[in-house]
Amino acid sequence: MFWILQAYPNIEGAVINDINEELICTYWVIKSYVGALLLQRRSISA
């Protein structure tokens, strides 16, 4: 999908969709809470 967005710069948005609800939830958390996610990752790695 990302190569398509690069090849066609006039595309203003895209929707990621999948039958796997957990995968979509993961995408949403990364998009919406990237800062908090990184803090959690650091605390787990420490």
Image (tube, rainbow, N blue to C red):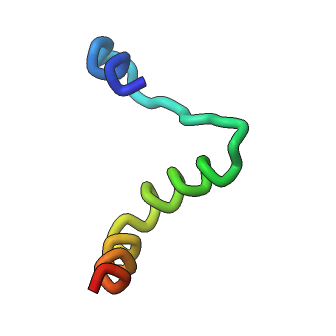
In the image, is residue 19 above or below residue 43? above
The image position of residue 14, as x and y in percent, is 48, 30
Q: Residue furthest front?
A: 45
Q: Nearer the viewer, residue 40 or 33?
A: 40
Please say if 3 is above or below 27. Answer: above
Q: Residue furthest top?
A: 7
- Which residue is rendered at x = 60% and y = 48% of the image? 24
- Locate residue 33, reporting x and y percent: 43, 67
- Tell me if 5 is positioned left or right of 19 in this view: left
Residue 16 lies in quadrant: top right
Residue 2, placed above or below residue 17: above
Given residues 44 and 29, the one toward you in this image is 44
* 30 to 23, vertically: above or below: below
> How many numbered marks does the figure carry?
0
**Where residue 19 sits: x, y (%)?**
72, 37
On the rendered image, what quadrant is the N terminus found in? top left
Residue 7 percent across, percent down from the top left:
28, 13
At 37% from the left and 82% from the top, the residue drawn is 44
- Left or right: where 6 falls relative to 29: left
Q: Quadrant of the C terminus?
A: bottom left
Front residue of this view, candidates 32 and 12: 32
**Residue positioned 69% across, 43% down in the render:** 20
Identified at 27% across, 20% down, the residue is 6
